Image: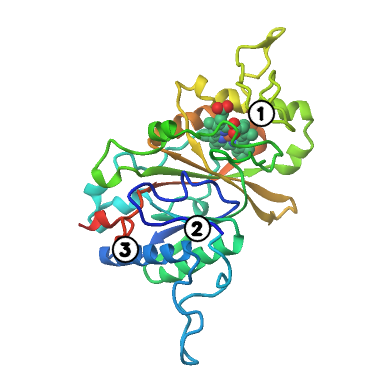
Amino acid sequence: ARSHPFYGQGHQAGIETEQQRYSVYMAFDVTSPVASDLQVLLARWSGAIAQMMKGLPIGAVEPEGSSAVALDTGEAYDLSPASLTVTVGFGPKLFDDRFGLAAKRPRLLADLPDLPSDQLQADLSGGDLSLQACADDPQVAYHAIRDLVRMAQGVASTRWTVLGFGRASAGKGQSTPRNLMGFKDGTRNIKDAADFDRFVWVDDDQPWTRGGSYQIVRKIQMNIETWDAAGIGDQQDVFGRTKAVGAPLGGKKEFDAPDFAKRSGDAPVIPVTSHVALAAHENNGGVKILRRGYNYTDGLNRYGQLDAGLLFIAYVNDPQHFIALQTRLGRVDRLNEYIQHIGSGVFFTPRAPGPGRYIGQELFT
Ligand code: HEM
C-alpha cells in the first residue's frame, strides 16, 4: 500500500499528489486566544499527521491500566496507509492581531468577496484552520480527521465538514472520473509541472510562504432531480462536452482540443454560455486553476430530495484567478440552473515542514 511522506523540502502533500479516492474536509475556529496554544497544536498535528501517513497509530491503542484512555482511537489500526495525505490550511483571520501574526500574513490571503449567485451559509463557510484528509480507504481518511479533532480540544473547535465519497478530478496520468452529473470531470485540469509553477505555487512573497498555495473551497449543491429530468442535448450544452466520451462538442475524443470558433449555422457548436467555454483558459487571458474536488452527499434534505453535490477545491497562487473566473461563471454559466454554492472558504496551505520541524513553524520565530 502506498504511503506519502509528510516532511520534505517541497510542497505539502495532497495538492500535486495523485488524487486519492476519498476525502474528509474539515474547517476549525481557533478558540484559544493564546498564540502558544496554536503553536503547540500545529506541532502536535504535524507529528500525528506524519505518523498516520505512514500507516502508524499516533499512540497506544490499548494503553496499560484499565482506566487509561487510548491516544489513538483505533479504527485504522490494521489498515494500510492507503495513500493518506492531510493538507493543513491557515484561514485569513489567523493573521488578524490576536496572535501577533499580522506581519506574517500571506500577501493575498483575504476573505473572498461576495460573488454573483452566492447562496452561502455561514455555518458551511470560513474558518481559521482547514484539514483535508485524502486516502484510498474512507476509514483511513476519517480516522485521521477524528484523531486530529481530538487533539484540538480546548484550542480549536470544529466549524464545518464535508465527506467526499469519490474523487471528481484527475491529476497527471490518472483516468478522468465523473461528477454526480455523470460527466467526466478533470479532463483539462492542470497536469504539467510548468503549469504548477506558473499557476499553483507561490514564489513572490515572504520566504515562509514560498512553495505554498491558496486553497479555495466551495461546497456546491446540485439540484439532482432537476438535472436528471433534463434532456441529454441540454445536459451536453450545459457543459459543452459529450456525456459518455467527454469530448468537446464538435470533437470526437476526450482530449481533443475544444474548438470554440467552430459554428453550426449561426451558433457556435460549443455554446458561449456553456461551462467549458466560460472556464477555459483560452477565454480567460490564459489563466488556469488546479481542481482537486470530491463528490459528496449529505443524504436527503428535509423535502426528501437527494442532497448532494461537489466539494470544489482549487489551488491557485493568486485567489484573484478564482474570483475572476467565478464572477464570470456566477453571472452566465448555464450550469447555474442546476447548482448553488452554499459553502466557501479560503486558506493558505504552506509548504511541507522539513524533518524535525512542524507546519507553520516559521510563524512563531
Ligand atoms: C471544466 C464540472 C464548478 C472551473 C469542467 C468540466 C466539467 C465540470 C464536467 C469539463 C471537463 C474538464 O475539463 O474538467 C463542474 C461542476 C461544477 C463545476 C459539476 C459545480 C458543481 C466549477 C467552478 C469553477 C470551475 C466553481 C471555477 C470557478 C472549471 C475549469 C474547467 C472546468 C477551469 C476547465 C475548462 C477547460 O479548460 O476546458 N467543470 N464544474 N468549475 N471547470 Fe468546472
**Residue under pointer 3:** 38
- Ligand 1 sits in which quadrant? top right
**In what quadrant of the picture does the N terminus appear?**
bottom right
Compute the Cα span from label 1 to label 3: 46 Å
Name the element at disc 1. Answer: loop
Q: Position of residue 181 (x, y in %)?
A: 70, 39
| Image point (54%, 38%), residue name | 172
Asked if marks 2 and 1 touch (Cβ < 8 Å), the reply is no
**Residue under pointer 1:** 254
Name the element at disc 2. Answer: loop
Q: Where is residue 65 in the image (x, y as percent from the top left)?
A: 46, 92
Q: Nearer the viewer, residue 278 or 63?
A: 63
Residue 201 lies in what quarter of the image? top left
**Residue under pointer 2:** 3
Locate residue 143 relative to residue 107 in the image: left or right.
Answer: right
Type of residue at label 3? Answer: Leu
Q: Where is residue 94 in the image (x, y as percent from the top left)?
A: 32, 53
